Amino acid sequence: MALKCDLCGKGPHYGNVVSHANNTRRRRWNPNLKRVRAVVSGVHKQIRVCTACIRLGRVTKAA
């Protein structure tokens, strides 16, 4: 199960955490995904959508 938004494809970003002493370690920033019951091509489905897509109105929620 990949951490990807089903609508926009947003996934995790990778980078370094840098401390004050310039020690670095790798970390991963995951997208904020929610499971939403939505209407996809006329069918009610549960999809994983990032909160940015929910706020922008890209999801039509099933009643």
Image (cartoon, grey):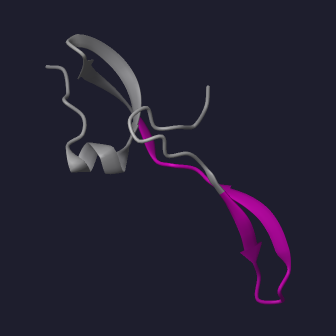
* Chain part drawn in magenta: 14-34
Residue toward you, 36 or 7: 7
Q: Main secondary structure of the magenta part?
A: strand
Quadrant that contains the N terminus: top right
Q: Is residue 15 left or right of residue 6?
A: right
Q: Is residue 45 left or right of residue 41?
A: right
Which residue appears farthest toward the left when viewing the image? 63
Residue toward you, 58 or 62: 58
Q: Is residue 1 above or below residue 50?
A: above
**Residue 49 in which image quadrant:** top left
Indicate yes or no whether the magenta region holds residue 33: yes
Indicate yes or no whether the magenta region holds residue 45: no
Q: Is residue 54 left or right of residue 27?
A: left
Q: Is residue 27 left or right of residue 4?
A: right
**Residue under the image location 35 percent in, 47 percent down:** 51
The image shows residue 7 at horizontal and vertical percentages of: 38, 35
**Residue under the image location 51 percent in, 49 percent down:** 31
